[in-house]
Every structure is written in C-alpha cells, then in structure tokens.
Amino acid sequence: LVLVVDYGAQYAQLIARRVREARVYSEIVPHTTPVADILARKPKAIILSGGPQSVYAPGAPQVDPALFEAGVPAFGICYGFQAMARSLGGEVAHTGAREYGRTRVDVTAPGTLLADLPAEHTVWMSHGDSVTAAPEGFDVLAATATTPVAAFENVARGQAGVQWHPEVLHTEHGQKVLEHFLLEIAGCQPTWTMLNIIDEQVELIRRQVGDGRALCALSGGVDSAVAAAIVERAIGDRLTCVYVDHGMMRLGETEQVKRDFEAVFSDLDVVDASDQFLDALSGVADPEQKRKIIGREFIRTFEAAEVRVFGDLSEGQAAVAYLVQGTLYPDVVESGGGAGASNIKSHHNVGGLPDDLRFELIEPLRTLFKDEVRAVGEQLGLPPTMVWRQPFPGPGLGIRIIGEITRERLDILRRADAIAREELTAAGLDRDIWQFPVVLLADVRSVGVQGDQRTYGHPIVLRPVTSEDAMTADWARLPWDLVERVSTRITNEVLEVNRVVIDVTSKPPGTIEWE
Ligand code: XMP
C-alpha cells in the first residue's frame, strides 16, 4: 500500500491512479490525517501531493515532520516537495518567479530518480515558491530556468521529490519518475493486478455474506454490472439482480439492458417502477431534491424486491440481507467520504441513501477507478457493449431536464437524445467521447421560424465531454459536420425543439451533468 497524502490539489486522484498503473496499490488520505494513523496503515511509501497554496501562506496545510522521521519512504510532488524541503532543513523562497504550464527541465545529475531520462525534457509546472537549497544529505538532480532545485533525492533515507507534476500527461517521462521512486527507491513490488482484485474481493465477499443472500441493483452501466459479476462469482445463485426502470431511461434502453443482461445473469428481475418515481417527482424542480427523491424511491423499490427475495425480514436479521452497489472510488472521494472534499452533488448511490437502510452494503469497486473497473470487466469476460458503455447517471434523464420532470418532457428529451447518440455512433466516436449528455432546458423557450411559421420552442443543449475519470473534463471538439447533422435532425424531427446549443465549458468550473 502506498498512501497519497492530499494537500488539496485536484491531482491527488491522478497520482493514486498513476501509482496503480505502476501496479502498486494506492489510496488517498486527507492531509488532516494524524501521522500516527497514516503509519498505522503500514504504508510501503507515502507520496505528498501538490496543493494550491504557498507553504508560507497563513493556514497552509502543514506537514508534520514526524512523517519524515518514521523511516517510511516518502516522495514529495510540487507543494509536497517544498514542504518536504522545509521540514528537513532546506530552504524555500518566494523568488517572485512563477512557472505555470509547460516548462523545460535540465537534468544535472540523474541519480536514481531521474536515471535514463533525457538531459532536457518538458514537464508540467504550477508553482510560485521555489526550493533554493536542498536539505542536508540530499542530492540536487535537476533545475529549471527559475528554479535552482527542481528535484532531489536521498536514496539512503528513501526520500525524494520533484517540483513538477509527474502525474499529468503533459509531463514527459512522468510515469518513469514515479516508477523509479516506487520500485527503486521505496522498494515496492509491482504485483497489483486486476486478477488479484477479483480474487481478493471474491474472498472478502464470501466471508462477509456467509450463507446470506444478496440483491444487486443493476443500472445498466458498467459499474453495477462488474460489481454484480464479482458477487455472482463469490456466492453464485444466492445473488438476485434487480433492474429498476424508473421511467427516466433513454429510448429503447430498458429493452436493450434486458437483452444484454439476461445473457449474463441467471436471476434477473426487471421492475417497472416508472409511475412510482414520476409521481414522487411531480412538481419538483430543485436538483438536490430530485436526487434525494430518486435515491429514496430506489431504496423503496429494493425493499419491495427484498421482501420477494428474502421473505419478510424482521429487525436484527439484516445480516442475511446484502445490497450490492457499484460505487467507485471517485464517488467516495467526491461525496466527502475520502479526502475531505466538499459535497458537490448527492450521488444517489452514496449520499442519497436514507438512514433507515435495512441492508448491509457490498461495494466491491469502492477503491477502484473507472478504467480499472473496465479492465476487471474484461478480465471477467463481460461483453464489450457492457464494459465500454458510456457512463449514464443513476438518476437518468431526470437530471438532464432542467425544471420539473414530466412524461411529456421526458419524451421530448428521449427523442432528441436518441438522435445525438445515433449520429455519434455513426461517426465512429463512441470511445473517443467520454459522455454525451443531451439536456432539455424545459423552462426556457425561444422564438424561431419553421416553414414561415413562428415557433416558440425549447432549447436542447449538447454536452459532449472528454475525460479520464469524470473528476475533470473538457468539452469535446466534435467535428462541425457531426454537430450540424445532430442540430438539423433534432430541429426537424423533434418539433417541440427549435434551437440546439453546445456547451463549451470544462469541468471545473462546470460539472458534466447540468444538475
Ligand atoms: P458531474 O456532473 O458531477 O458528473 O461532473 C460526474 C460523473 O458522474 C455521473 N453522475 C452520476 N452517476 N449517480 C451516478 O451513478 C448520480 O447521481 C450521478 N450524478 C452524476 C455523471 O454522469 C458523470 O459521469
């Protein structure tokens, strides 16, 4: 285990992923975690992430020097590098020179950390302060035009650091630097694989469930499918899968999911709960309220399924009733369960659960990133249509109608969305685009003209994004001829819509979904 201590940068998750790409398991802990707790987890190494602040800023997260005295190998990145330098007796100065973005670095003495790297290469920087003197016993390995100490190491102590961000793709050879630290300096073994995860989870689930029974909520997406497949491997036919049609799925989706999943899972229960959900949502326009209601109705539906599967569970019998969820690591971190991040949206599978839950949860993907889940899915032999399906939020089209959700509005959005998806597939871009939400601004109307007639219709927003993990995203530069086809077809075929616009906001500051 390698622990990434998060000093408040959006990069901590990226670092954890890169460490795992080096086949070393890693998790993130907030910088507020006491050193004793960090050490109690017996990490093989600790990585200190970058952070938004200057080490000298009032209230800047402080690094407890005890972290460096415990004999655990440590690697500092950006802010973590400066904090490490300062804690160990080096010097950090406001040089006034800032470096942002692509910067050339000169490797002056490669040592172990920068071995085999070109003497000059390009890295990604984002800092105001600079380390001007390395701590005693440390070798300086590299410099930039404005930063005399851009990397250092003390191999005997197992400590090293770099001013740049080795975890971002714009940094050349970044992965190599991380691997040099992990494998050469910290002595980690590259043994973490998808196969291990499956075996480990199967074992854990068998122990957790004993001879109990489990229910799995299949959403149609890759996460719940992979979670269910792991649990099925562990407990076989004591798993029942339930797919709830909440009435906010896309065109033809429920039929598709049914076909695909019946081929994989033996015990599949398809529940049509659309009236129940849509009635409960009637008159509600507030996004958080919608999410809470959807989360609540999901659980109600499962409780009904529970009675069908387990019989009537009385108090104290929860130990035989388990609910499988495809919760991922980013959901856990983003819902405030991880690195002290603030709650941005209530994900219906984490924050939206009511308190009177009668199941015990099984979450075999709780520590995984999306690309890892896909790799596990392939390893389990699930079909590519399931493994490579683009993410679709649990609340479905409900959070893509801005305003109250009604059956008429769902019908409008469904037809527009089907056109956009069809054209994206026809253009062969399904795997290049992370997600392609289509949003209906249901309370907005604008004037248009069609066949000499004045129209007063709704706008549709296209929100194609590229992303690696949904934590950050960029708007996708779709080919204009594709955008044109989508726009023409939607305004011709969906008469309630007379305007198509495209969302060109990255995340942050926008989120992927509009609600
Ligand atoms: P945002 O809008 O926060 O979305 O940038 C990030 C990713 O999460 C998906 N999403 C959800 N998935 N339940 C889910 O299962 C939810 O409540 C939920 N809300 C957002 C979103 O589609 C994107 O992939």
Image: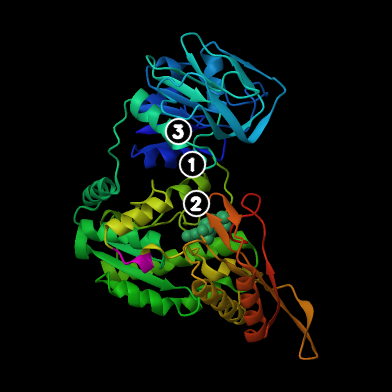
Residue visible at 42% across and 77% down in the picture: 254
**Residue that numbered label 3 is attached to:** 4
In the picture, the quarter occupied by the N terminus is top left
Measured Cα–Cα span from mark 2 to mark 1: 9 Å
Q: Nearer the viewer, residue 408 or 474?
A: 474
Q: Can I make out residue 322 in this image? A: no
Q: Are marks 2 and 1 in contact (CB under 8 Å)?
A: yes
* Scheme by which the image is coloured: rainbow
Residue 127: quadrant of the picture? top right
Indicate the amino acid at tag 2. Glu
Question: Along the horizontal axis of the image, is 343 left or right of 27?
Answer: right
**Secondary structure at numbered mark 1:** helix
| Mark before the other along the chain sequence, 2 or 1 | 1
Q: Position of residue 17 (x, y in %)?
A: 43, 42
Q: Can I make out residue 275 in this image? A: yes
Q: Position of residue 49 (x, y in %)?
A: 51, 31
Residue visible at 24% across and 71% down in the picture: 266
Q: Nearer the observer, disc 1 or disc 3?
A: 1
Indicate the amino acid at tag 1. Leu
**Residue that numbered label 1 is attached to:** 14
Q: Nearer the observer, disc 2 or disc 3?
A: 2
Q: Nearer the viewer, residue 268 or 455?
A: 455
Disc 1 beta carbon < 8 A from ligand 1? no
| Mark before the other along the chain sequence, 1 or 3 | 3
**Residue that numbered label 2 is attached to:** 468
Residue extent of the magenta highlight: 382-386
Q: Nearer the viewer, residue 31 or 252?
A: 252
Disc 2 beta carbon < 8 A from ligand 1? no
Residue 190: quadrant of the picture? top left
